[in-house]
Each structure stands twice: as structure tokens, then as C-alpha cells.
Amino acid sequence: MSLTNELNDHELGEATIFKSRIRLPDIQPLSFLQQEGRFYDYFEANRLCFLCGSCGSPSLERRRTLVMLLSMFLSILVTILRILPAMALGPGKDYLQAFSWAFGEYKCLRPEICDDVDARVYIGLATMVVEGRHGGATLRNTISWSDPSCSEALASFGAGHYCQICHEASVVSAALALLAVFGGLACMRLELQRIRRKNDHNCAKTTAVMGAGLAALISTIAMSVFHGICVHQFPRISANGAFQLDTELGSGAGIAWSTAALSIWILVLQLALPTPEARWKTYGEVSEDPAEGAWPSLARWRVGRSSIVPEVSGDNAEASAQAGRRQDGSERQDGNERQDGNERQDGNE
């Protein structure tokens, strides 16, 4: 991988559209995708990849480097933002309070029972922190969803059975959140690769577009699962009616939702920049091929679109010719017989 190559491959015909001396890695396409075979047919040269590769505005070709660097900047930002809510998985109380997935307050409804004690609740994927204030003292209690004592600790709130429910929801949500982080790291490689026209191709663009879309979907599902199964189902009134719980999205949840929105912008940027015509155009003239000779030819796709007559060769061609000759002979014989019959009929009359 060379770090000193110039980005001088942004040329269409004789006009130089963009030149830059930015020192960026020259990431080559996967070699098995550049060879004739099943991988090439399944992942590079098919109608879906042709359609995805052709989508976009050719005018953005002049700003290819800018578009891809902007997409990569957003990917880096999204990756950092995805890590912050994941910090709520840790045992530290400060991290959970800073990046909680839900925040709530228990208000005292019956002073004769709760003695005017108000409590704040910070709900994370792995734990829940209850911070109470009574007089001038502040008491904190950290409750882990997987801890056997969780049910007993939440029994007074009438939520003891929710420990197992929230634990199962947190496992699913945490796995999805971490999957989105690793998926974002993989997409950054494709963004670096697509900066250079000679390295851009249909599979890279399709994978980047699908990766951004899946990342947005995964983040949304992770939040929906945890909030729908655990937070929204949590009892709002304690068992003895002494406390009322009001919940809202925590900072970690807000950050997670923002990553889903940013992933949509990444998808749009990836989709807006088409791949070179030589990678997908199966009709008409191709303006140029920035990686001439590096990829299999699309000639068979062009023949398939321009001709409606099936090709025949070898024995099949000879058999077709013989069949044609026999048919012509039969037609001539039938014509001669009809003509003789007509002449005999005229003579009889």
C-alpha cells in the first residue's frame, strides 16, 4: 500500500477535473473480484450491482475526494458516538450517569411512607443506579440486572421480575450496538478505497451503501428493543403507592439516535457518487476506464442487450443450416407440385 501516490486519476478524456497531492493510502480492490468466476458474477457483475453503481450524479465526479472524505469524517464521528453509549456497560457509576440509556425520577407520593425521599434513576444496559436524597445526605445504590440480589432490591418498587427482562433486553441491545461499531470500522476502509476512481467498483459501493443502511437500522433496533422491553414496561407507581416514576431518554439514548441519523447521511453520500462507467455501463460508448485491463470485460453483457438473436456455433450452427436448406427444398417442391396441378387442370378444361 503506497502512501505517496498522487490523486491524479480524476481525468475524463483530455480534461483534468481534479488533482490533489493529499497523502492517502492506495487501497486496492479485492483480487478475487477482479477475476472471471462466480465471485465476480455474484458480487460485481450483476444487475443489482450495475444499478447501484450507476446511481448518483456524474457531476459529483469533480468532487470525488471531497465527497468521500466527508463521508469518512461522518463515519469516524459516528463510530466515536457509538462508543459513548456503550460505556454505560461498564460498572462505573459516573459513566452510567453521563451516558445512561434512560433517566427517571421517583417522586414521593405518600410522605408518611417515603419520608419525602426523592430518588433519581439512571438506567443502563448492564446496571441501574438509584441515587436518593434525604436531608443533606446522598445515597447511591448500583443494581446489576444479572445480579441475584436485583429482584430483592427492586421489590419495593414492584419491579423485581423486571431484572431478568431488562437483562435479556440489554444483552440483545449491547450485541447490536457493538455490531454497529465494528460495521462502521469496516465501511471506513471502503470510503478510503472509493476516493480513487481506479479503485472504485460496484461491489465496494453496494457494500458501503448497505453497510450504512444496516448500521442505521441496527442502532434503531437496539434502542427500540431496550426501551420497548425494559424501560417503557417498568412500573410507574411503586407497589405501595409511595413513589411515582417519570422516565425520559438519557444522553446515551440521544447519542444512539443521532448515530442512526448520521448513518443515513453517509448512505446518501455513498449512493450519490457513481462508480466509473466501465464498471456498469452495458450499452453505448464508455467514456473511459480508469483501471483499463484490471477488470474483466462487460462485452458479454453488451452483446446480450444489443442482440435479440441467440448465438449458435459448431454442430448447432451446421444443424441449423441443414434444417434451413431442407425447409427451403420442401417449400420449392410444394410450389412446383401446386404449379403442375394447376397446369393440368387448365389443360383439361
Image: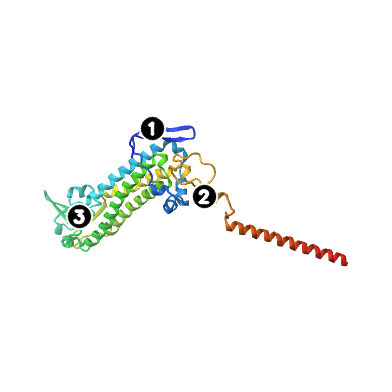
Q: Is residue 87 left or right of residue 344?
A: left
Q: Nearer the viewer, mark 3 or mark 2?
A: 2
Eye-nearest disc, 1 or 2: 2
Secondary structure under tag 1 reads strand
Q: In which image quadrant can residue 159 be found?
A: bottom left
In terms of depth relative to the viewer, which is nearer, 163 or 222?
222
135 relative to 278 in the view: left or right: left
Mark toward the start of the polypeptide (3 vs 1):
1
Query: Image quadrant of residue 10?
Result: top left
Q: Mark 1 vs mark 2: which is more N-terminal?
A: 1
Whether residue 206 is visible, yes or no, is no
Question: In the rendering, at what x and y percent does residue 110 appear?
Answer: 17, 58
In the orientation shown, which residue stands out farthest toward the right?
Answer: 349
Q: In the rendered view of the protein, which quadrant contains the C terminus?
A: bottom right
Disc 3 residue type (three-letter): Met
- Residue under numbered circle 2: 300
Task: Report helix, strand or loop for mark 2.
Answer: helix
The x, y position of residue 64, in whole percent, is 41, 38
Horizontal side of residue 64 vs 344, given as left or right = left
Q: Which mark is residue 20?
A: 1
Taking depth in this image into account, of 240 and 291 the one nearest to the observer is 291
Residue at 22 percent across and 47 percent down: it is: 98
Residue matched to label 3: 128
